[in-house]
Amino acid sequence: MTAKKERYAKVLTTKGNGAVIPEEKRTPIRKGPSPDKRLTRKQELFVRELVAKDGQITMREAAINAG
């Protein structure tokens, strides 16, 4: 490993107080929802309502309309 990579590895493995976090205790980084997770019926209605009236209603109004 090059010196630069080692430096960045140390930065990524430390907490604010400088303690090293063991590999098994690190929290995995999530990059969005799981692909196998589906929206509930209410969530789907909310999204459809919000998109259909693009910019004309607030999120609150879309939530109320969706039920």
Image (cartoon, helix red, strand yellow):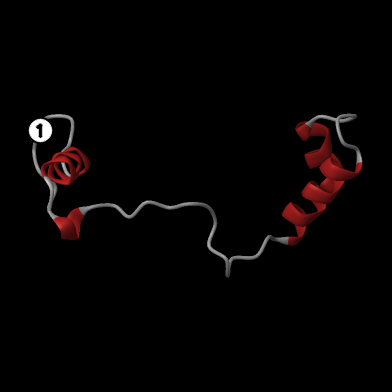
Number of numbered discs overlaid on the protein picture: 1
Along the viewing direction, whichever of 17 and 67 lies nearer the viewer: 17
Coordinates of residue 12 in the picture (x, y in percent)? 22, 42
Q: Is residue 29 left or right of residue 64?
A: left
Judge by depth and name the residue closer to the eye, 50 or 10. 10
Q: Name the residue tied to disc 1.
A: 18
Q: Give left or right: position of 39 versus 65.
A: left
In percent of width and height, residue 35 lies at 57, 66
Q: Quadrant of residue 42?
A: bottom right
In percent of width and height, residue 52 lies at 90, 44
Q: Residue visible at 77% across and 32% down?
A: 60
Q: Is mark 1 on a helix, strand or loop?
A: loop
Q: Few, some or many C-alpha atoms within 10 Å of disc 1 (few <14, some 14-19, many ≥20)?
A: few
In the displayed structure, does residue 23 sit left or right of residue 28?
left
Q: Name which residue type carries label 1.
A: Gly
Q: Which residue sits furthest front?
A: 2
Residue at 33% across, 55% down: 28
Image vertical order of residue 23 relative to residue 59, above or below? below
Residue beneath the point at 82% across and 39% down? 62
Residue 63 located left or right of residue 39: right
Q: In which quarter of the image is residue 16?
A: top left
Residue 67, position in %: x, y? Answer: 82, 48
- Vertical relation: 7 (above or below) 48: above
